[in-house]
Amino acid sequence: MQKKKPELLIPAGSLEVLRTAVIFGADAVYIGGEAFGLRAKAKNFDIEEMKAGIVFAHERGAKVYVTANILAHNDDLAPAKAYFRELAEIGPDALIISDPGMVMLAKEYCPGIEIHISTQANNTNYLTCRFWHEQGAKRVVLARELSMAEIKEVRKQIPAGMEIECFVHGAMCISYSGRCLLSAFLAGRDANKGECTHPCRWKYAVVEETRPNEYMPVYENERGTYIFNSKDLCMIGHIPELVDAGIDSFKIEGRMKTALYVAAVTGAYRKAIDTYFEDEKRYREHIPQYLEEVAACTHRNFTTGFYFGKPNEETQIYDSNTYEKEYTYLGTVLGVDETGAALIEQKNKFCVHDEIEIMKPDGSFVRATVLGIRDETGAEQESAPHPKQKLFVTLSSERPCETEDLLRIKSTKDAL
């Protein structure tokens, strides 16, 4: 039987990032509105931005899914009806939902839009998937806590027309499929309504009742005190196993990530998937390169999560709660003037004579030297210290800059 190429599903927290994801090879993008999603601190999309994003994606053959995956309370239901009416007008390809009440509303007010059941619904067995299929769901996002063997069994036991989506890359949550109460308890911000403060990344100590001012560090072992801090998931070296398990959609985590992160991870997984389907031997030979490419953007140390067995002490990070960061995002090329200078909206500081890198949508990387920087009035600058300033950048490189390229520079620090 011919293998089915999986969908590459990429997160986007803004219209800029959505465009980047599609340009660098996403088959589909998932986004959140200003309410009812689980990333309230992300920029997110208003209705007009959603419209623009859907048009942009559809023109290029990509899909857009909208998250509405909070665990709703009574007060959420009336505004959710109005929200779903708006979504029905603009036509995303699917809604990602976890709450049964919200599923009922989506079926009533968005009858022509697919329903995908979020990982927040704790989808851990095939009977759960069958249940959601009977409720009209097209796809189930399986819990991160399933092994490869369990995923294969789910695939065997559910209708052929039902799709399976699984996370393959990004941050892991210490709570069961993300249903965490820590944030609400410690900070008054409910993770299940999109306001997580990420207390799993904090450093903890113990205080004994009769000695209230003495803070004693928590040691799981001699390496440190970040007892809840998981490594990041990375499955780019295991594409064959994921395909063999029958997974229809490979999901990348990270709706709060930058365009640089999304470009790097999308490009790497796009190349890995396409190469595997063209030539498995060549894919396996290039695994070190793919790992190097995803490690070049902001990340924690990598793990394969639950796919090959339950995580152990090696899956935690004990000595730090910071990300590793190899490159810094400078901007996306908005256009090229008659002199060949690239127009960008600057994101981070860089200077004349800096060695930078051009990321191409075809997955290639081109080294370049900054020869000159000028503002929109034509005034020359030695550096670009002001975020969001529109600048023309003259570069020396083997290949010229083109619209939609990304510019990045090697970071001077290892962590954020």
Image (spheres, helix red, strand yellow):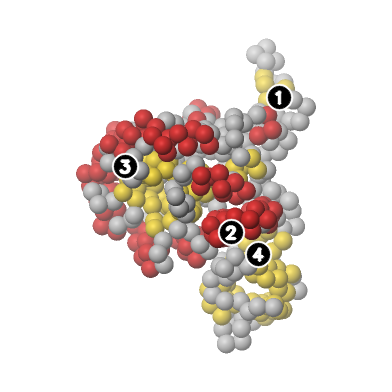
Q: Residue furthest bottom?
A: 338
Q: Quadrant of residue 293?
A: bottom right
How far apart marks 2 and 3 lie (CA) works out to 34 Å
Q: Could you say whether the residue bearing mark 3 is in a helix, strand or loop?
A: loop
Q: Which of 219/156 is in front?
A: 156
Going from N to C along the chain, the mark reached first, 3 or 1, is 3
Tag in front: 4 or 3: 3
Mark 1, residue position: 220
Q: Could you say whether the residue bearing mark 2 is in a helix, strand or loop?
A: loop
Classed neighbour count for the residue bearing mark 4: other residues with Cα under 10 Å, few (<14), some (14–19), many (≥20): many
Amino acid beneath label 3? Ala
Mark 2, residue position: 279
Q: Could you say whether the residue bearing mark 1 is in a helix, strand or loop?
A: loop
Classed neighbour count for the residue bearing mark 2: other residues with Cα under 10 Å, few (<14), some (14–19), many (≥20): few
Indicate whether 65 appears above or below 191. below
Q: Quadrant of residue 367?
A: bottom right
How far apart marks 4 and 3 lie (CA) works out to 41 Å
Mark 4, residue position: 408
Tag in front: 2 or 1: 2
How far apart marks 3 and 1 lie (CA) works out to 42 Å
Amino acid beneath label 1? Glu
Indicate whether 298 appears above or below 353. above
Mark 3, residue position: 137
Going from N to C along the chain, the mark reached first, 2 or 1, is 1
